[in-house]
Image: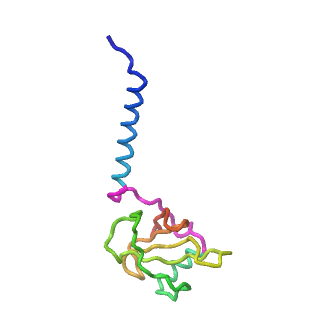
Amino acid sequence: RWRPRSKSARASAERVRMMRVLFALLLAACLGLAQAQEISPAELPAEARETLRLIASGGPFPYRRDGITFNNYEKRLPLQPRGYYREYTVATPGVSHRGARRIVCGGARRRPAARYYTADHYRSFRKIRP
């Protein structure tokens, strides 16, 4: 005869399901399968479009640290060899320092193979469409 599972057995089964989901998400992130949301250049702030223009022309850049290597320590972007990614500041109106906004490019300096925008100082990225 069938008997319903106890409350503790149901809770245990639910924990196992949640652990499987979390493991799958972690695995996807580690393998670079968790893709950044995309954004078109037209959707970017005007200051980000100006930064893209400067990148394409090779500068000059307004901030001394523009063009330095972005190391991707948190692995939020697809894994690449050290030195592949470079970061550029996107000016933030009303802020007297560099602010949080950046564009990170991968590949050739003037014609990068990948471009990403972050408005929250590398906590999240949106891939910039070509």
**In the depicted structure, whether residue 67 falls above or below residue 72:** below
Q: Give the quarter of the figure containing the C terminus.
A: bottom left
Q: Which of 41 and 101 is in front in this view?
A: 101
Residue lying at the far bottom in this picture: please name it: 60
Q: Give the magenta part as a residue range.
A: 29-46
Could you tell me which residue is drawn at 50 percent across and 68 percent down?
117
In this image, 10 relative to 31: left or right? right
Q: Depth check: 6 or 48 in front?
A: 6
Asked if the magenta segment contains residue 32, the reply would be yes
* Residue found at x 40% / y 33%: 14
Residue nearer the viewer, 91 or 73: 73
Q: Residue 94: x percent and y percent?
A: 68, 75
Coloring basis for residues = rainbow
Q: Quadrant of residue 75?
A: bottom left
Expressed as whole percent of the image width and height from the top left, the position of residue 37 reads 47, 59
Asked whether 108 falls inside the magenta stretch, the response is no
User: Which corner quadrant holds the N terminus?
Assistant: top left
- The location of residue 77, given as percent across then percent down, is 40, 65
Q: Kindly indicate the quadrant of the structure image that contains residue 105.
A: bottom left
At x 56%, y 85%, the residue is 62
Image position of 60 with respect to 123: above or below:
below
Seen in the picture, residue 1 relative to 70 is either above or below; the reply is above
Q: In this view, does 107 lie above or below 117?
A: below
**Residue 101 placement: quadrant:** bottom right
- Residue 33, given in percent of the width and then of the height, sits at 35, 56
Which residue is rendered at x = 33% and y = 52% of the image?
27
